[in-house]
Amino acid sequence: MKRAVERHLNILEFTLASLLRRKVKNLSLLTMYLLVIFMLASLVFFVTALKREAAMILNDAPDMVVQRLVAGRQDLVPAEYAAEITRIRGVTAVRPRLWGYYYDALNGANYTVMASDDPNTTSDKAAIGAGVAKVRNLAVGDLLPLISYDKAPLMLEIGTIFPSASDLIAADMIVISPRDFHQLFNFPSGQATDLAVSVRNAKELPTVAAKIAVQFPDSRPILKSEILRTYQSVFDWRGGMALLILASSLLSFIIFAWDKATGLSAEERKEIGILKSIGWETSDVLLLKFWEGIVISLTAFLLGVVLAYGHVFFLSAPLFAQVLKGWSVIYPNFKLVPVVNAYQLAVLFFLTVVPYTTATIIPCWRAATIDPDAAMRY
Amino acid sequence: MIELSGITKSFNSGKANQFTAVDNVTLVINPKQITVFKGPSGSGKTSLLTMIGCMARPTSGRIFLRGVAAAVPFQQDGVEVVEITSLPERFLNDIRRSTFGFIFQQFNLVKGITVLENVMLPAYPTGEGRADFRARALKLLEQFDIVRLAGQRVELLSGGELQRVAIARALINNPSIIIADEPTAHLDSKLSQEFMTIVGCLKGEGKSVLIASHDPIVFDSLLVDSQVEMRDGAVVNSRSCR
């Protein structure tokens, strides 16, 4: 046992010395490899963290949102729907919500405007997200001028700027009083954008949704689980798009790595011959090449994953943010909570380290099976 | 003692271009002596040595090692003869590693690594502790007066220094038989004489030395015990120089 361990250690040591001899070749290979692992791992970390973030945000979301459809499009919900839905068994609360979008021609940005539920919210005051504050260069106490539906200015004093921690949902948000909301959009009273419905028992949600759909045929109940699924799909789709963009570089790397790993130079062949002639067995030569492959691919994998971790969770993934976050003008500035999915990392490992190591060994197999006396004839 | 019985080595057997490199050689090589195989290029010297050194198998014939401590796992105590031609590949490797040390015509050192690493190279896969064979390698470098070059890469060495490194490498696993193939082909007369002096020392240490050479400095050396003259794959003359 001790001899077997010593044999591995000795050959590993020679492997390291051997790799250092071909510094340029191996360093260029390592750099390419590292870059690909870094990009892929960043993508995996980022998408996983975003999906988790979205799931956490949806924890506070209502169990069900009820919209109304007219001619296949979302329309305003009459307030009396809320009173009717409240009477369905199992429903604990129904909250009409007022919200909409405001296009800021000055910056080309879209804001999400919401009416506050808080009865103490005073008119002419607004709470805004950090993204809005940044693009409009606003601080607490400043005035935010918005243009109403009739082009009349609506001057709102900034009372609060949401902290950066809530940026993922609040970056583009403006929260104002219901009165200001009605005035800004000429929103008809007695109507809501949608209804937030709370149900006592989560298992009853599909039943309650079915009852609402029967009672109000023009309504569309959307469950929290459905919203979550949509978020997951969106981020998966965005991840897929980014992967597609990376595909060409991935392909280039595969061709490059294959060429470098499989192509044995005349000098390498001669070296294998020398090793065999001085008593190395075919298995010793293969072990040497196995360690060579492992050293390069594992170093690239570990370094790539560590760098990707820093890139995503400490620097907020500047390379992917614009592709994956999805805002056009206002990008949320937030730190993702580190999440590492062991399964995805294992898949990444088996898709990168294993093929490369195998690709290194196979051509050597042929070279290593030469007769040891070939070295006598060089 | 190494005993060769009817050794033949043919290439491309059964084809139109069949070529017999060694033809029915029967020979006894005495232990702890210097035996020189001489003859022109293509006379079969190298082919014969590769078969003795377990690097290649003969097409026919048998090779016996008598009284040589060969690393054969199933060898029973007290059995002094090992017939190496019929052994499986991995046993041949073990014998080659432990019993023979090789010095090649082109030295065959691995470029890019140090002198010390080159010398230690045959010991890496043996499973021996690194500290042990490293100490042995340094001792060999000291013995050949090149310990100062231990950390230097081999491509920076002179011909004579390369020769000594190659000899040190051949001795790292403490073999009882040294096989040298045209060792002086790339050396000037002075270095060739120096080589023969080292070989004399090895003989003094009780090692058997087999040299293939057509250099008069080698085969006319007073240190040589036996000469085997070959031509066209056959032994034409075999004599003791004592």
Image (spheres, coloured by chain):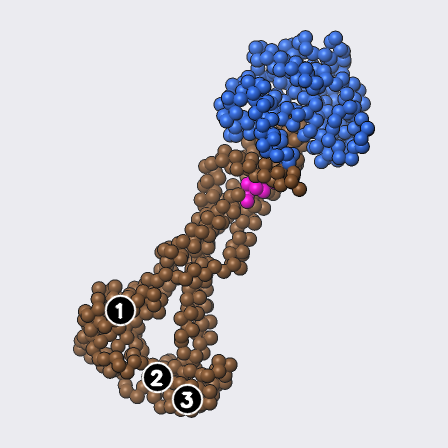
User: Rounded to the nearest whole Å, what is the CA distance between mark 3 and mark 2?
Assistant: 11 Å
Q: Give the range drawn in magenta.
A: A287-294
Q: Mark 2 lies on which chain?
A: A
**Foreground label between 2 and 1:** 1
Chain letter corresponding to the colour brown? A
**Which chain is painted in blue?**
B
Where A365 sits versus A254, above or below?
above
Query: Is B34 left, or right, of A97 in this rendering?
Result: right
Q: Mark 1 points at which residue?
A: A161
Circle 2 sits on which residue? A96
Q: SS for tag 1?
A: strand
The number of numbered discs placed on residues in the rendered structure image is: 3
For label 3, the crowd category at 10 Å Cα-Cα, with few meaning under 14, some 14 to 19 and many 20 or more, is many
Locate residue B88 relative to residue A175 in the image: left or right.
right
Q: Which amino acid does label 1 sit on?
A: Ile
Identify the residue at horizontal 47%, vertical 42% (top origin). Answer: A29
**Numbered badge on residue A85:** 3
User: Mark 3: which secondary structure?
Assistant: helix
Q: Give the label, 3 or 1, closer to the camera.
A: 1
Residue A242 location in percent, x, y?
42, 58
Residues behind callouts 3 and 1 on a single chain? yes
* Mark 2 secondary-structure assignment: strand
> Cβ–Cβ below 8 Å for labels 2 and 1?
no
User: Disc 1: which chain?
Assistant: A
Evaluate whether label 2 is on the same chain as label 1. Answer: yes
Q: Residue A44 carries which label?
A: none
